[in-house]
Amino acid sequence: MKKDKILVIGACGQIGVELTLALRKMYGDQNVVASDLREEHELLKGSGPYVSLDVMNKEMLHVLVIRHNITQIYLLAAILSATGEKNPLLAWHINMQSLLNVLDIAKEEGLDKIYWPSSIAVFGPNSPKADTEQHTIIEPTTIYGISKFAGERWCEYYNHRYGIDVRSLRYPGLISYKSAPGGGTTDYAVEIYHEALEEGKYECFLREDTYLPMMYMPDAIRATIELMEADAARVKIRSAYNLSGMSFSPKEISEEIKKHIPSFTISYEPDYRQQIADGWPQSIDDSAAREQWGWKPEYDLEKMTVDMLKNLKK
Ligand SMILES: NC(=O)c1ccc[n+]([C@@H]2O[C@H](COP(=O)([O-])OP(=O)(O)OC[C@H]3O[C@@H](n4cnc5c(N)ncnc54)[C@H](O)[C@@H]3O)[C@@H](O)[C@H]2O)c1
């Protein structure tokens, strides 16, 4: 029987740290190799193998896959939405070439499964704003969204043309307390909890009425693992699945925080990220994920706020 051996690329990022730890619990510490450009994250130290890797170096990646007998890759390295707008050509280059390197090695080495996340950023100003459907107008205007949409097409192409078992989710903005966010437009929803506890106030870079799709990290990790564990025949969408958790505005999250910290105050100073947010949907229809592989979120804004504040206080 063939044993699963997983490589996580971008393991020190906001998602990577928690996903690596969750995969190690499931597959055994030694069977999940964490890798990143950065130094090993504190929370990963001592929990399993760690290698330094630049995913843009295809030869190095190829050698690593062969040396460690890798059977599955989770590719999380990327330049996110807000950072991408500062250097569009770099974001395009890294987001595309990293995926092409991984897909091509998967083909050459006959890997079992590949995971690569997409984003709600694939949608643009012409997409419907509410309950945005899986198949609808997709005209991204940020370089991040353009690279995610092109990536989705490549994933589907490698699946249809070469039979690669590649799976993907369009994550909403992700909120977590373990590792810091990496330069996205929804980062405010993480910062606000830290500042509420440390300063008692927060200056938000989005307008108070900016509704965006969001998700608490435990739901995102579970969705990722449930998709990857689902029987291949149930995974009918090979570009990327819409995925929904909750939708709220800066005003709503601040009111939720005030229930726990009554003196908390928020002010608004929208910057360039407002324009990015204005082009995205406010809520997502994820019925395909629910119907095909049984997705169901657990956390709403109230439950997440209790958990975030409890853990950040520790
Ligand atoms: N966090 C979110 O809210 C969110 C939402 C939608 C989609 N996503 C997607 O999920 C994935 C992970 O996001 P994240 O929030 O954890 O990002 P992050 O920026 O926190 O982490 C990315 C990691 O990749 C590493 N990396 C960058 N370039 C690399 C390279 N050349 N070689 C190896 N490692 C490299 C970085 O050092 C970093 O640790 C990305 O594809 C992102 O687009 C994230």
Image (cartoon, rainbow, N blue to C red):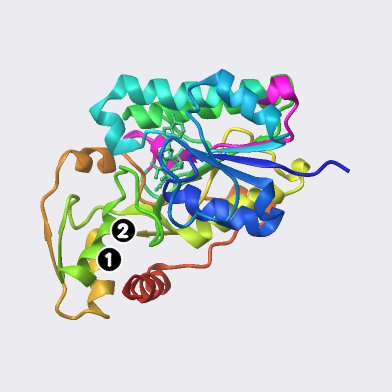
Q: Is residue 311 left or right of residue 185?
A: right
Tell me the quadrant of the picture where the C terminus can be found. bottom left
Please indicate, yes or no, whether residue 87 appears anywhere in the rendered image.
Answer: yes
Q: Is residue 267 left or right of residue 313?
A: left
Q: Amino acid at mark 2?
A: Val
Residue stretch in magenta: 106-128
Q: In the rendered view, tell whether residue 99 sits above or below residue 30.
A: above
Q: Position of residue 149 (x, y in %)?
A: 47, 29
Q: Which mark is residue 40?
A: none
Name the residue at 24% across, 62% down. Answer: 192
Which residue, given by chain and number where applicable, does mark 1 sit on?
193
Tell me the quadrant of the picture where the N terminus can be found. top right
| The quarter of the picture showing ligand 1 | top left
How would you rate the neighbour count of disc 2 (Cα within 10 Å): few for under 14, some for 14-19, many for 20 or more?
Answer: some
Q: Position of residue 142 (x, y in %)?
A: 32, 30
The answer for how far apart the CA atoms under marks 1 and 2 are is 6 Å
Q: Is residue 1 left or right of residue 294?
A: right
Element under disc 2: helix
Extreme-front residue of the structure: 46
Q: Which mark is residue 190?
A: 2
Query: Which of the 4 image quarters holds residue 79?
Result: top left
Magenta-span inclusion, residue 242: no
